Image: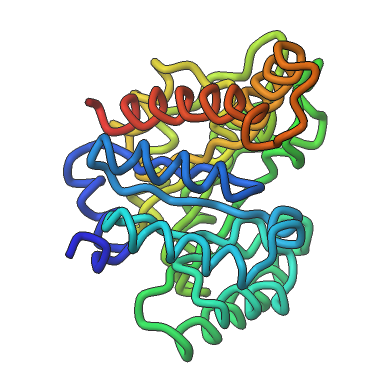
Amino acid sequence: MSHTRTLDECIKEAEEKKIALGHFNVSNLEMMWAIGRVAKELGVPVVIGVSEGERNFVGTKQTRAMVDSIKEELDHPIFLNADHTYTVEGVKEAIDAGYDSVIFDGTKLSTEENLKKTREVVMYVRSRSAHTLVEAELGNIGHGSVVRDSIPEEAAHNESMYTKPDFAKMFVDETGVDLVAPAVGNIHGMVKSGNPHIKTDLIEQIREFAGVPLVLHGGSGITDEDFIKGIEAGISTIHINTELRLAWRQGLVQGLSQNPDEIAPYKYVTDAIEAFSDLIERRIKLFARI
């Protein structure tokens, strides 16, 4: 059955084919179903992500149970990632709930503390699961899923602030993480005037030095051309959140305005689901080159 494939296997296959898996964040059951149905229709594996805030809203265990139910019914490889987790305790909670991957985000810590806690995370995951992947984000790409007026000052917005290939190698060697999310011109959120371009030559160098698959965070706002170049350079998973939230909100506003007297949520939320699904379809087709 297709849903017995591991996330690691799907990422390796994506690298071989020079395509990327889409990682899409959710906040409710309707979003999970939309992602699953589109991925099934297109025949492409997909990753559903929930940040700490989203897990607190939906429920860590409840998200796992809902994704499992959808995956089983669709008989399709749908994986669940504990996105941006800032504490070891938060990682343990997701791992104990059976998540397929987890991101320990130590970008606000000192390098020494980040290495120490990431090692602790990796050791815990290895003791609990043979197939769960651990990802580390290296370099500051800003924080928050918002539409910005300008690039945030704290984010890496010039080459001197980008992730260094030798640092990525050291981090992987010291911690044993399975995936690395570098700062290569990408930022979280969207910038009204346009997001920066990503550095494809740097992606190639980091992939070579690190020796593990690379994940592109802050995918919202990046141009289609940059996505394709990034995938060809070595990106195998791409995170999308902000533009999905924006599409959902705009669809919901439209649904409410066109049906001002409707009080049944499953009826006035239809436009939001449609807008969300359309964007998921466009992104999956682009990343999978179909």
Q: 4 or 215, which lies in front?
A: 4
Q: 54 or 267, which lies in front?
A: 267
Q: Relative to residue 257, is residue 274 depicted above or below?
A: below
Could you tell me if residue 204 is visible in this image?
no
286 relative to 269 in the view: left or right: left
Could you tell me if residue 257 is visible in this image?
yes
Q: Quadrant of the C terminus?
A: top left
Q: Quadrant of the N terminus?
A: bottom left
Query: For residue 227, what is the image quadrant?
Result: top left
Q: Looking at the image, which residue is at 42% across and 17% down?
A: 224
115 relative to 134 in the view: left or right: right
Query: Colour scheme used in the picture?
Result: rainbow
Q: 272 or 256, which lies in front?
A: 256
Percent coordinates x, y for residue 252 in the rendering: 69, 24
Q: Looking at the image, which residue is at 72% across and 16% down?
A: 259
Percent coordinates x, y for residue 231 in the rendering: 34, 33
Percent coordinates x, y for residue 284 in the rendering: 36, 32
Q: Looking at the image, which residue is at 23% across and 37% down?
A: 18
150 relative to 199 in the view: left or right: right
Q: Looking at the image, which residue is at 56% across and 60% down?
A: 136
Q: How many numbered badges does the structure rendering display?
A: 0
198 relative to 10 in the view: left or right: right
Residue farthest to the bottom, as pictured = 127
